[in-house]
Amino acid sequence: MFDCIIVGSGLAAISAALTLKANAKSFLMIGEKNLSDKISKAEEIHNYPAFLGVSGTAFAELLKTQLENEEIVVTQGRVNGVYAMKEKFAVTTQDGGMYESKTVILACGVESGKRIKGEQEFLGRGVSYCATCDGALYKNKKIAVVCLAKKFEHEAKYLSEIAEKTYLFPLYKGLDLSGEKIEKIIKMPSEIVGEKRVKGVLYEEKGEAKHLNVDGVFILKEGLPPDSIAFGVETDGVSVKTDRRMQTNLKGCFACGDITGRPYQYAKAVGEGNVAAHSVVEYLNEK
Ligand SMILES: Cc1cc2nc3c(=O)[nH]c(=O)nc-3n(C[C@H](O)[C@H](O)[C@H](O)COP(=O)(O)OP(=O)(O)OC[C@H]3O[C@@H](n4cnc5c(N)ncnc54)[C@H](O)[C@@H]3O)c2cc1C
């Protein structure tokens, strides 16, 4: 069992990992080998101490070298469940991984995109964030797939191969996916509707409300609502609530960076990641 599992691989996660490493704690960092788009895509950074206009790509390269030097490895994966158990946490990933730890640090960034009306209400009742977890449930059914970034196109493709019909809402430029069973709709869905389960999705076209009958809606996006990853974690509706030690309402579960709210900035992510890791060390030592 790990002392800690860090969910994410952005600056908050990296800062936490460096501090855990310095304190000789065992940990697993689950995220992206490429760290975070929010690092590599920054044009020039001027508001971070000693950075006189460093580019995002240069910043990302420095971080990768630092992780390598410290022998910190990012385990590629997307966490889809953090379960607080009596004295430990179970953490699951979309590709079927299952890990255990004494503590958890949530550092997976802020939820991307505006929530669609009905998204929260029908989560688990037809709304899913995970193609590989829930795709098979929609074999030969009609689905809507709201895809927020090109990097999720392969998941949309996978879903379209399973479903009888896929209404694809790509919310980015440069879509490279088509097929007989796919109908593209270049709009933002306005509402997910249903009764016990999802029955349809609404969108507007030329001022006219359109309704599509679907059995499920997949929303493929980078940042997910925190309470859809860590069950039972308290939020203010968007961000995870923490105290000054970055402790959440779940004992042993800490959060840092954009996931805890504004300002969305590197300096805050680094500071909070550091505090969260120190709190993990204190928590483990107290035990
Ligand atoms: C284009 C751009 C430019 C910016 N420029 C600046 C700037 O100049 N100065 C500044 O201060 N701030 C800037 N920001 C804001 C800054 O990037 C963020 O505040 C900061 O990166 C937040 O770090 P974080 O670690 O909390 O989250 P993120 O960097 O968002 O990292 C979250 C990580 O978690 C991973 N993740 C998400 N969900 C899961 C999951 N379920 N399982 C596992 N991993 C997951 C993601 O892949 C990512 O690696 C910029 C943002 C953007 C988008």
Image (tube, rainbow, N blue to C red):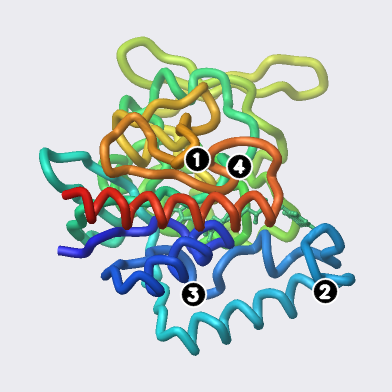
Q: Position of residue 15 (x, y in %)?
A: 52, 64
Q: Which residue is mark 3?
A: 33
Snapshot quadrant of residue 217: top left
**Residue depicted at x 38% and y 44%:** 254
**Badge nearest the viewer, 2 or 3:** 2
The answer to whether the residues at label 4 and label 3 have Cβ atoms under 8 Å apart is no
Of mark 2 and mark 1, the one earlier in the sequence is 2
- Near-viewer residue (42 or 50): 50
The dot on residue 99 is none
Q: Which residue is mark 4?
A: 112
Q: CA distance from mark 4 to mark 3?
A: 20 Å
- Mark 1, Cα crowd under 10 Å, few <14 / some 14-19 / many 20+, is many
- Given this view, does label 2 or label 1 mark the residue nearer the observer? 2
Q: Secondary structure at mark 4?
A: loop
- Tell me, for residue 54, which label it has, or none: 2
Circle 2: element type: loop
246 versus 177 height, above or below? above
Q: Residues within 10 Å of mark 3 (few under 14, many from 20)?
A: few
**Contact check, label 2 and label 3, Cβ < 8 Å:** no
Question: Image quarter for residue 20?
Answer: bottom left
Query: In this picture, is 115 found above or below 70?
Result: above
Determine crowd level at label 4: few under 14, some 14-19, many 20+ residues with C-alpha closer than 10 A.
few
Q: Amino acid at mark 3?
A: Lys
Residue 139 seen in render: no
- x, y (%) of residue 268? 65, 49
Of labels 4 and 2, the one closer to you: 2
Comes first in the chain, label 4 or label 3? 3
Quadrant of the displayed image that contains ligand 1:
bottom right
Residue type (three-letter) at the residue carrying disc 1: Ile
| Amino acid type of the residue tagged 4 in the rendering | Ser
List the residue tagged with mark 1: 219
